[in-house]
Image: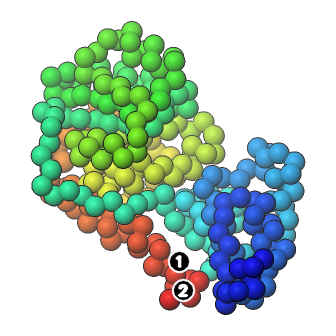
Amino acid sequence: FKNIFSYETIYIYSCELYVIYIAIMLKSKKIKIIYHQFEMMIPNELNKIDRWLLQEIIRKFKKVDLAIFPEQNGMIYFREMLLTHNSNQLFILPNTNNNVLIDDYSRQNQKIRVTHIGSVGSNHHFQDYLKALKKLPKDRFEFWFVGMLNSDIQDMILEEDLENIITTGQIQHSALTEIYLNTDIGVILYKDTCLHNRFCAPNKLYEFWSYGIPVLGDILPGLKSVFKYKEQGILIDMQQPDEIVDAITKLEAFDKDFRDENIKIFNSTYRLDVYLGKINNILNIT
């Protein structure tokens, strides 16, 4: 309350429905409300209180100055729930970053490294991926899993006993830089098991791209909307091990020129600063 009376303009920024609802109740000309939806709000997955808050926000959405979404399809899903809106109220901000590549870094691995970042469970294309990597030469490829693995996934890896599969468990985010610098191909293993996966917007995708790494993933709407250049990687039917093998073989051939071009695409199109400048313009921040 002190801030509301002390400053010319107040920005209330939150991903919490309760905070946005209170901000709407307090709305005045000097208050700008920014709602950032990191995860999709699917009504039948919410508890009663959050469903009611969401309904109230939708009913009074004209008071929200800007709603931010990490992915196009998720934004459309939310937009279709609205009674009314204008185009300037909705904005796509990918889960991206401002990473800077270390130019003089020397690779530490000799094999082609294919890396998955994040947890792996039943909502991932792991079994078909495992079938595919068994078909690729062990002396040329190594496959890294960085993050938490469900117990059944760990059991499958142990059963195969392949020396070119490396698991690290969970590590600090700061330790990922070295992983990315030694990665040749990134992998997104999300499977179309729910709306959250279908309209996925993984931050690891943009971290791969910020280092110039091409990415292999499933043909999911959330990925299709941002894969626009060949340098970014390949989307395939991840239920087909042979397609995975073919895609990895193609991506293996991506040389430094492809990676440099991927970094240029990221810096001009997907870098965080590109979006922050657009947000400032929408909110007339100087």
Q: Nearer the viewer, residue 41 or 7?
A: 7
- Mark 1, residue position: 279
Image side of residue 85 versus residue 217, left or right: right
At a point 63% along the width and 40% down the height, the residue shown is 194
Total number of numbered labels? 2
Residue 8 visible = yes
- Find numbered disc 1 in the image and state the secondary structure of the residue it sits on: helix
- Is 167 situated above or below 210? above
Label 1 amino acid?
Ile
Judged by depth in the image, the label closer to the viewer, 2 or 1, is 2
- Is 247 situated above or below 80? above
Image side of residue 58 versus residue 86, left or right: right
Label 2 amino acid?
Ile
- Mark 2, residue position: 285
Q: Nearer the viewer, residue 17 or 75?
A: 17
- Is 267 situated above or below 86? above
Q: Give yes or no for contact between labels 2 and 1 (Cβ–Cβ under 8 Å).
A: yes
At a point 48% along the width and 49% down the height, the residue shown is 202
Colour scheme of the rendered structure? rainbow
Image side of residue 38 versus residue 112, left or right: right
Task: Report how far apart the C-alphas of labels 2 and 1 lie in the structure.
Answer: 8 Å
| Location of residue 27 in the rendering, given as x and y in whole percent from the top left corner | 79, 80
